[in-house]
Amino acid sequence: MRKEQAYILLACLLVITLAVRFYFAFSTPYYSDDESYFHLRQIETIREHWIPQFYDPLSFSGRLYLFSPFFHYIFSFITLFGSSWYVLKIIPNIFATSLIIIIYFLIEEITKNRGIALFSACIAAFTPIYFVETVNTLSPHCLAIPLTFLFLLCFYKLREPHYALYSGILLCFLVLLESSTLLLLVGLLGYIFLEKIFELPQRKEEKEFIFFGVLLASWFYLLLYKRPLLEHGIYILWQNIPPQLVDKYYYNLTITSSIYHIGLIPLFFGLMVMYYILFNNPFKRSEEQISIEERKKIFPIIGIIATTTILLWFKIIEWTTGMIYLSLLLVILSGYGYMLLYNYILRTKIRSWNTGIFFLVFIIFALSSSIPLITYSTVRIEQSITPKEVAFLRFLPEITSEKDVILSLVDDGNYIEYFGNRKTVADSNFFQIRDASQRLQDINTLFTTHSKIVATRIMNKYHAKYIYVSATAKKLYGIEYLPYDDNHCFKLLYTGEVRLYESTCS
Amino acid sequence: MKALVREQHLSKIFFLALAALVLCIVPLYRYFFYDGYASQENTYFHMRMSETIFSGIFSADPAVVMETSYFFDPFDALLGISRFFIGTHAALLLPFILGIITLFFVYLTIAEYIPSAKQQLIAGIFLLSCPLTITLFTHATSYGFIAFLMSAGIYFYNRKTWLAYIILPLLCFYSLYHSIVAILFLLLLKKKPFALSVCLVILAGIFSFLRHDSFQFQIPSLLILIQQLFSDFGSSFGLSIFGILLACFGLSTIQKKELWIVLCISILFIFVSPLYAIYFIPLLAYSASYGFFSLLERQWSLSHLQNIAVLLLILGILFSATSMISRIAQENPTPLHIQGLVWLGKNIEDKTIILTDKQYGFMAEYFTHQQVLFDKNTPVTNIPLETSFIFYAKNPEQTTTLLDRYHIDYIIIFSETPHAQLSNYLLTKENFKKIFENSEITIWKIEGPL
């Protein structure tokens, strides 16, 4: 395939991907998760005051939360000259789609085959987990993931001085953006380990760069997370998520879920390549031998895959983050697999069926991935906050005072803080919260207890004045009204799609 | 040659000055901002024992109601003697003095195996910047004294002085493992320590028998072990990640089989208890000095990263050390704890029993001079099960069982205690009175049966 031809097709793929993404993203004016609204609040704060809000007066009724604000600064800058909600939906999708170009060049670098690179880029564009988790959310993932793979591309060419510089700059960006960079660095350590096992010649510059990267990331994160590390110790890995909620973020890694979220084709070809590279017989005929160069390009990816899988298996990294990395890395590996298949077919009598076979592979991918992609995306879009809820939350400042604390479901916390601008008892970010588990337990008790005394005691404990019962809370607890609602201690102030109660007893 | 001796002499002086500077920060801070009260709860156990140790021989701690055994600790005697000369600030000064002497002995021992004065000084700086060193010599606990015995004993043994035969056997007052580590170190020095080793093994065995040591230990999970081993992950008795990284780098350049053997055995001891990480400190300083010079002298392909990497390592090591200093300086007891406990000490009647969380038992005993029901040294099997009922009981009878059975007169609740909330039943009783409260400590008095 000619270069121009490939580029035109790549541009077409980009346009199609963006169109599909925009279709889903604009089917609701709101984001699919509450965490996006935390980021949105930080972006707006930076735009107003030039500094992020490390002390958040609303979250958990006031808490200190240290994080790296690099992502928020980038988005504040982008939206500096008049922002609107659609800009903050378009930009993350553009960033996420840029991954297609990077994957294309990455696979072209490994396979030296433009057709296969384009084919793999197409698969990467519609990998279910990546698509769904970046289509209608505002999170550092949309920028960190493409940059991680761009870093990998530069890492391959580390021998050239300007690529060493680009790698350094990218690494600094990644470290500032998201702590999942540690996954990449640990994976690269795994790569060095694999090189040792297979007695491959090690490049000095790669070892030096990885050593530097590990030092930089460790230093930065130890500095940034010093306080939480002292408070939670090594359990910081689980972000202080209460045991009751751990299963929501850290699932078991199963084959079915992998097929569903990664896709059958990348998973099958990826695993096949891993087997081929790691267990290929070195005494085979020379034409079937894998060159050292090829191994050296595949090993970093295998290193990161192995690390991610181990960490996912032991539930040390968040399931979504781990699966996104795993799926995209398998897409790259599968690119090498298509090349092996392509070369194999060329050596057989069915070489003329080559296009047909690849078309069949694509059909299988489309069938196996499109169903989870569409259903999963639709479900995620449906999970977005409804316009009625937003309308009510925007009305909160009119009926409550600035000092009032609102008790709600953990998942509704960020919505109340963003739309209602009111203090909450808890939201979904438990980092650096000492009594996170207790708060969660109390919220659960408040929604399930029949005792007015117990409920009042909980409300007083957190100095909360209102209870917000969202549609999600009603569904979760199977209630329409609070069980102890008798207009004496808990006065129903508003009823509709959501309910608002006022606690009047002390 | 003369220049080398002068260089080595200067590096020793510089090291001593630096050691004094680093180790004096915490005592000075405590002196000026905490009325001279030392940090860490365990310190107050030794402070109390140093007061009572010369009053008689006892096998159980007299300040604890539930049976808690006590075995003579030479450190308590030393602290008692220091109190005689220095006064109440002995808990601040003794660790400092012990620290300076110990570090000097370790420095001299390491220096014998490092050729250049510059590298000796760098090893000394790594020795000083290790967070565990700072912890050891700012807390008035036996660990600092054990480190002193070990370093002085080995130094004198290396010099073939008879003092080693007096100092090293004192290790037998502590766990058998310390004596084993001492023998290992002596073997590493290749001075045929047969007689001393046999003597140490026999004495340690006898003392272990007298102490009824069980030698049972539980291997913690890997994550907990990692957390306990690194100060950066919150351990107050841990090493610096960057220090370890540099030491690993140095180890790869040192081709000494004996060093690897001792290192492997030391790692095994860490599984017994992370407290044995104290024996890593000299090894760490020694290897890190080699790692540092190897990192500086190595020709990097990406030369622009070399200086940044070295700078990051130095900053990382300094970060761990400074972070540890600031943590220790602000450790318990806080001024508000002291305020509450001193107030109780002045207003308490004689022969009363106090109930508090076992973590704070030592402080309560020291400040009030009264008995506590149990403290941190009380075996778990001796702690009454009903204790938890005070906090969680739904049944009023359960709440009062413990208080009545052990005639408890005071309950001290510290704000840091998990679930520090008394049961509702107790709070409604008229003869259960809150007599003192600040934001960190609440004291309740029980007047008569509930």
Image: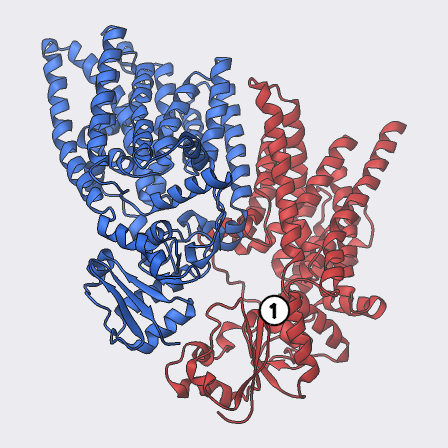
How far from the left and from the top, in percent, is residue B292? 65, 31
How far from the left and from the top, in percent, is residue B127? 69, 43
Asked if one can make out residue B393 in the rendered structure from this viewpoint, the answer is yes
**Quarter containing the N terminus of chain A:** top left
Q: Name the residue under label 1.
A: B209
Q: Which residue lies furthest to the front in this view?
A: A398
Q: Looking at this view, is B251 or A318 the one in front?
A: A318
Q: Colour of chain A?
A: blue
Q: In this view, does B136 lie to the left or right of A393?
A: right
Asked if one can make out residue A386 in the rendered structure from this viewpoint, the answer is no
Q: Looking at the rendering, which quadrant does residue A340 occupy?
A: top left
Q: Chain B is drawn in which colour?
A: red
How far from the left and from the top, in percent, is residue B308? 60, 27
Q: In this view, does A505 lie to the left or right of B26?
A: left
Identify which amino acid the numbered label 1 is placed on.
Phe
Q: Looking at this view, is A107 or B96 the one in front?
A: A107
Q: Looking at this view, is B228 or B251 the one in front?
A: B228
On screen, residue B368 above or below A203: below
| Mark 1, other Cα within 10 Å: few <14 / some 14–19 / many ≥20 | few
**Quarter containing the C terminus of chain A:** bottom left
Circle 1 chain:
B
On screen, residue B426 above or below A324: below
State the count of labels: 1
Q: What element carries label 1?
A: helix
